[in-house]
Image (tube, rainbow, N blue to C red):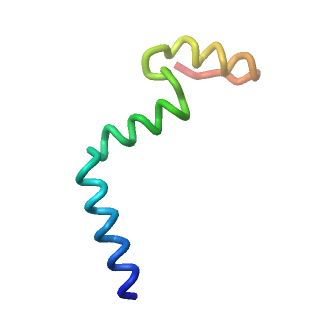
Amino acid sequence: MKLLGQARDETKRVNKKTDNSSRLRRIRHAVFPKIEAHPKRVIDKLSEYGLTTTD
């Protein structure tokens, strides 16, 4: 159990070093690039797959 505590402390230290929100933003952009900026493109993508969005 001591190892788990050490790992948790290490993660905390790393998270403090890299701002957590920007890290998540980078991850989100890697997975869904530019979705926030182009909602129309997302809807076009969905309609390609035959899915619809309800207003």
The quadrant where residue 9 appears: bottom left
Q: Position of residue 15 (x, y in %)?
A: 29, 54
Which residue does the image show at 67% across and 21% down from the upper left?
A: 46
Tell me: residue 45, above or below residue 17: above
Which residue does the image show at 52% across and 19% down from the upper left?
A: 55
Q: Position of residue 13 (x, y in %)?
A: 26, 61
State left or right for residue 25 relative to residue 49: left
Q: How many marks?
A: 0
State left or right for residue 21 relative to residue 41: left
Which residue does the image show at 30% across and 57% down from the upper left?
A: 14
Q: Position of residue 12 (x, y in %)?
A: 28, 62
Taking depth in this image into account, of 33 and 15 the one nearest to the observer is 15
Q: Position of residue 41 (x, y in %)?
A: 57, 13
Which residue does the image show at 66% across and 18% down from the upper left?
A: 45
Q: Residue furthest bottom?
A: 1
Q: Quadrant of the N terminus?
A: bottom left
